[in-house]
Amino acid sequence: IGCYALALIYLLAVVGLVVLVRHALRERDLALGTVLASAALLALSFVAFLARYPKQDGDNIKALYLLNAAPVVALACAVGLTTLAGSGRGRRTAAVAASVAAGLVTLAFLVLPPD
């Protein structure tokens, strides 16, 4: 169930990013455009880092990039959740349940076991 919940979270983020980009372009919202541009520049800098310093084992993910992207991804997930959930109570309940399941699956990576 964990991989399905995480796939839903990724879907929420992608849908949210599409909705945010569309809204920023249609409404010419400078504040939202700045937030999205910072995420785009962050992604470009990460790709440039991968091209400049390739690793043989493929492990190039740096926490600095992920932490800087967290607010934009959280905003995109929230917008995606409200977009996909719509007014249907069943869809909203399923989306919230999948979000809770994804959080429980990743909890083991966030909390260190006692010594």
Image (spheres, rainbow, N blue to C red):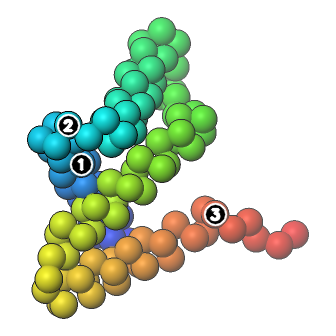
Q: Give the quadrant of the C terminus.
A: bottom right
Identity, as a three-letter code, of the amino acid under mark 2 = Arg
Number of the front mark, 3 or 2: 2
Identity, as a three-letter code, of the amino acid under mark 3 = Leu
Q: How many C-alpha atoms fall within 10 Å of the one at disc 3: few (<14), some, or many (≥20)? A: few
- Lower position in the chain sequence, tag 1 or tag 3: 1
Determine whether the residue tagged by mark 3 lies in a helix, strand or loop.
helix
Splitting the image into 4 quarters, where does residue 101 fall?
bottom left
Q: How many C-alpha atoms fall within 10 Å of the one at disc 2: few (<14), some, or many (≥20)? A: few
Q: Say which mark, if any, is on residue 20.
A: 1
Q: Say which mark, if any, is on residue 89.
A: none
- Lower position in the chain sequence, tag 3 or tag 2: 2
Indicate left or right for 68 with 7 as reference.
Answer: right
Between marks 3 and 2, how big is the CA–CA gap? Answer: 38 Å
Residue at numbered disc 3: 110
Identity, as a three-letter code, of the amino acid under mark 1 = Leu
Residue at 48% in and 72% down: 103
Number of the front mark, 2 or 1: 2
Indicate left or right for 89 with 6 as reference.
Answer: left
The x and y percentages for residue 85 are 19, 76
Q: Is residue 18 visible?
A: no
Residue at 42% in and 56% down: 74
Residue at numbered disc 2: 28
Residue at 60% in and 35% down: 64
Splitting the image into 4 quarters, where does residue 86 fall?
bottom left
Splitting the image into 4 quarters, where does residue 78 fall?
bottom left
The x and y percentages for residue 9 are 32, 63
Between marks 1 and 3, how big is the CA–CA gap? Answer: 29 Å
